[in-house]
Image (cartoon, helix red, strand yellow):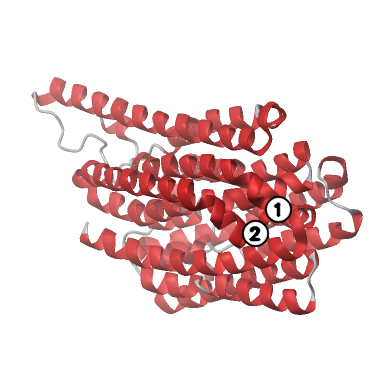
Amino acid sequence: MKRLFTNMGWLLGGRGVNAVLSLVYLALAAQVLGPEKFGQFAIIVALGQAITGLANFQTWQFIVRWGANGAGAAEATGFAIALDLMSMVIGAGLACLLVWSAPFWLPLPQDLLWLTLGYCIVSLLSIRTTPIGLLRLRFKYATATAAETAQPIVRATGAIIAWFYMPSVAGFILAFAASEIAVAAALWFAAAREERIDLSALSLKRIPAKHPDAWKFVWSTNMSGSLTIAGKQVMILLVGTFGGAALAGGFRVASQLGMALVSLAQTVSKAILPELVHAKDDAMVMARRMANIALVGGVLAVLVALFAGRWGLEAIAGAEFRVFYWAMVILAIAGAVELVGASLESLLVSAGRAHTAFIVRAVPTILALVLLDTAIEWNGAKGAAFAVLGSSSLAVIGFYVAILNMQEIRITVSEEGDGKPSPNPANLNPANPNPSNDA
């Protein structure tokens, strides 16, 4: 627990720097561009991040899982890099298709389409989950945090330059693109200093040959990551499709301020997963403690959004965005729910139940996207925010039920064997990622 909180401290410190600098570029972009053009900016960013998220594999999880010993780190890294290259190729094709079809379903003018495609390609080339995984494998959270600060620093600096010299959608998109390149370069440089990158180990076959469940884990985590993207970036795109650019811009501002806790949830998840993999018998206790702490933090954050959110929206984005106050509060509640569920989802993944976590996340996410048009017609941005809240709530309830089911199965089987319940109900053993097979 001490190492976990130390690692979380470094990650949250980086998030703190990111949050402060994010307010700089958010305020500049929103106030310079206004709701309509800021909405176009938000749609371009969301499209680039959605394509990258959908094509990208969560390779940092593979490195942590299969590179836990020195002999496996090189092969795990080679497998991860091969997957990254595959992601870039798939993502580039997807980007061309979606940008070509954008005029039919997104409120983007023709003169922004080439800019949109360029941003999508830059985002794909800046995939960086593999170097992040190498740093987390060695518990180099301080190094990773220092490297990741390149993104908010370059982004905020670029936004200031755009404000002075190029106050347009293109200017702010160029600032974002530069920040993606900068953070990817910084992370690869930091990872290469900690771990030798052996390109001769690049292979899509070696890891699956040693771990028969490898591809199942790969696709499960990829789809879970894709669902996380769908719950945020695809949601913004569909808000733009159904409600127009101005509504998408307002929803983006409300989401960035209200859903800041989702970023915190992701931070908790990234810090706790390596510890759960190593903890084995203590994993359940560790996850329970983190969930309790998260509950307190979530309640406090919602209270801040409720009492200071209206002022924050006006001060940061301008008076035109004040109408999105209640959407921001609802999204803050959704963020609090995600914060509580972060450790539960990580517990499932570390126990080899990534496919279960995917199914539990998939059903409510798809339901929210299907009902989004109706929700927007019912209550605009607030309706869209309620769709997000419902999705998050159902997912976290599902994680909890899945964990209880795992405990019951493990205890029942153990009692049949020797009359004693297992001290490790989740069977969190990286060497045996399938608890049901062990039972």
Vertical comparison of 73 with 319: above or below: below
Q: Are marks 1 and 2 in contact (CB under 8 Å)?
A: yes
- Three-letter code, disc 1: Glu
Quarter containing the C terminus: top left
Rendered position, 314 above or below 224: below
Q: Which x, y percent locates residue 29? A: 70, 64
Task: Identify which residue is drawn at 28% across, 59% down.
Answer: 4
What numbered label is drawn on residue 320? 1
- At label 1, counting other C-alpha atoms closer than 10 Å, the crowd grade (few under 14, some 14-19, many 20 or more) is some
Q: CA distance from mark 1 to mark 2?
A: 8 Å
Determine whether the residue tagged by mark 2 lies in a helix, strand or loop.
loop
Q: Is residue 354 left or right of residue 153?
A: left
> Which quadrant of the figure has residue 140?
bottom left
Percent position (x, y) of residue 93? 76, 51
Vertical placement of 407 versus 324: above or below? above
| Residue 89 coordinates in the image, percent (x, y) | 70, 56
Instruction: Kindly identify the amino acid type of the residue bearing the numbered disc 2.
Output: Ala
Is 87 placed left or right of 148 in the picture? right
Q: What residue does disc 2 label?
A: 317
Q: Which mark is residue 263?
A: none
Q: 381 or 92: nearer the eye?
A: 381
